[in-house]
Amino acid sequence: MKHLNYFFLIKILFFCCVGFAQENKLSEKEILIQQLQAGKYTGGDEFESYKFSEKDVYATFNIITKELENNGYKTITNTEFNDKIKKIFGRIIDNSTQTKFLSVDFFDKCNRNPIYSRLKIFDNIFIIKEKCFITKLYAIPELIDYQKKYPDLKKIEDEVIYRNEPDLGNQIIIPHWKDISDLDQQRKKNIQTLVARNMYLFNDSKAHFKWLILNDAYFLESLVTKFGYYDDVKLLNWVIEGNVKFDNDNPEALDQLFWNKKCDGTVKLNLEIFPVLKEIITPKDVNYFEALKMYVMYLLDEEKRNELSLKDRAKLLAHLVYFGEQYRYDSNFNDKSYFMQRIELYDIKGDIKKEIIKNNYYNLPNYENLYKKSEEYQDALVDENGG
């Protein structure tokens, strides 16, 4: 009898799991019906007429796969996709789990809970593991011409949709999807965005990178400033030149360019930035240098930069100073940068210098001689001023 009870319990659990899976993998048409019945509420940021869930994400898998294929997207292998996702978003994909997708929160990158809200205050994407693409949370009418594909559903949108407004409790009429005048244009833009993001990130498409610059700049910028993706030199160049201001009155703004704190508490330094800066900055670009000098001062202030360990601060400062010092002795650069003196004068405890020396100057060529040249320059200044 005891074994029989176990058998029935296992059987019940099996059917519960199957039922749950079926509930969350309803057909495209079944989900579309639910979305049409709820309508599209477009007023305000506090109330949604339809409550999205994971079943809505599942329902778009085939639609998005087809659109990507039709627009030239080449699906990469799971291994390649997983590696890219780890590099770009810092997320690790485990293909052995039942979970079909991961959620990436652009407001709080360390949030691992899926966000199914469509309110403007939320901005997130879903990483579809098996299909190897990323997507926003879309309603089916935002991706396909549902009236053409499912003409038999017309009667659903002939009925008026009433809902109670959440704050005052007043009854309001919810517009249908068919009432959105520019829905065709929205669909086109959604497909273009889907294709461009995936073609750029996973097919290395230069043409789609240019499209994203013009139409999806926030997404591109966030890859660098929010998630610390530094591998694409052209992307890094674009962010430096046009999206992050080099302001000597606001040095902390440069944090988002020079380092990124990961969700496990570790810090990733953006040392890839220096060759890019060398391409951008000329000896006459004084504004860049003034901002970088103030950033050095900012990093030397331990109280301000307590998020960075001594090890990370020393390494970043060493590279910053090394970069700046290359320009000091340029004959075209009249405003001497004296980056090295900043460490000499303001590293009060000497901890930064000790850390740099301990790490063999991070193998930066001729770095040790920069100390000597810096001392010579400092002595010359003292003599010049009658010291």
Image: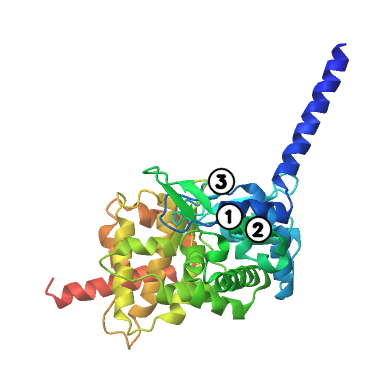
Q: Is residue 216 visible from the viewing direction of this image? A: yes
Cα distance between the residues tagged 3 and 2: 40 Å
**Residue where numbered disc 3 is placed:** 112
Tell me whether the residue at label 1 lies in contact with that at label 2, contact meaning CB atoms closer than 8 angstroms.
yes
Say which amino acid is labelled 3.
Arg
Residue drawn 47% across the image and 57% down it: 260
| Residue 3 - label | none
- Along the horizontal axis of the image, is 5 left or right of 202? right
Residue drawn 75% across the image and 37% down it: 19
Cα distance between the residues tagged 1 and 2: 7 Å
Of all residues, the one furthest to the left in this rendering is: 386
Residue drawn 53% across the image and 65% down it: 179
First reached walking from the N terminus: tag 3 or tag 2: 3
Residue drawn 47% across the image and 76% down it: 238
> Residue 228, percent across and down?
50, 60
Say which amino acid is labelled 1.
Glu
